[in-house]
Amino acid sequence: MPLTTHLFNKTRLQAASQDGAVVPLTLLHMPALSELHKAPLLLHVYGAYGVDLNMAFSPEKRLLLEDGWALAYCHVRGGSKRGLAWHRVGSVLQKWRGVEDHAACIQTLHHLGVSHPALTALTARSAGAVLAGALCNHNPQLLRAVILQAPFLDVLGTMQDPSPPLTVEEGGEWGDPRIREHMDNIASYCPCHNIIPQLYPSVLITAYSEDCRVPLSGVMKYVERLNKAIQMYTVPLGLVLTQHVSQLSFWTCSQEEITLALRIFICP
């Protein structure tokens, strides 16, 4: 049942993933659940490092809710919604489970009458872009628009390069490409290495030239490959490139960009 505050409704839902796992979903909305069929939907996903989604409220989120949007948080495997085991079963060789969980969440919402693909957008940051990018490659029909912030998109290329300071530490999350099984698995979901000519959602990427955690080269490689893949389609693709800023300013700025981008890509 929805939990109502003076600002919005909070509804807890569940989605059945491909292997039968039950994935938690949190939905924020102002209209009643039964009235969300024509509402634009903004999905949030992360699914990495055992970190749960940041559901902190903000003026930008309130603005979207007041404009009639529904905000969904997909607590997929790889995060921490259900403890340490929830992370373990969504990492290394099981990374695909997070992608499957995410698709199941979107399909469940649409099946329940919450929005539809033409009004569905997705936002992800940093490592969350791995799941978002994989979803765009394999289930692009589920989305209308995607907004990625400082996205990690070239998993295979980055993990094969030992020079970045975090590469060795990242093996516990993505796997070790020196192991053939791990390399093949990374290659199967890596957003940058699975782009094909097809109709993609609209994409807006914000990247930072001095970001030491997410190599800019991977972002540029992704944009170049995606731009070639969508040449025969009319699909907006935008890249906002700035210098690295503080964590606080970074996320405040991005929320404003998200609100603007959503109003451009999807008109309620």
Image (cartoon, helix red, strand yellow):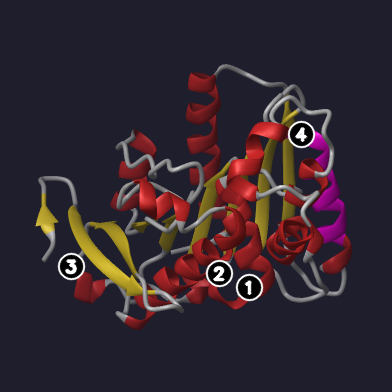
Whether the residues at callouts 1 and 2 have beta carbons within 8 Å, the answer is: yes
Give the overall secondary structure of the magenta segment.
helix
3D distance between C-alphas at marks 1 and 2: 6 Å
Mark 3 element type: loop
Q: What amino acid is at disc 1?
A: Pro
- Earlier-in-chain disc, 2 versus 4: 2
Judging by the rendered image, the residue that carries numbered circle 3 is 32
The residue beneath circle 2 is: 143
- Please identify the residue farthest to the bottom as the structure is shown: 111
| Alpha-carbon span between mark 1 and mark 3 | 28 Å
What residue did someone put label 1 on?
140
As drawn, 51 above or below 211: below
Quadrant that contains the N terminus: bottom left
Asked whether the viewer can see residue 136, the reply is yes
Residue appearing at x 69%, y 29% in the figure: 166
Q: Return the x and y of residue 99 as percentages of the image width and height.
A: 54, 65
**Residue 228 x, y percent position in the rendering:** 89, 63
Q: CA distance from mark 1 to mark 4?
A: 25 Å
Of labels 1 and 4, earlier in sequence is 1
Q: Amino acid at mark 3?
A: Ala
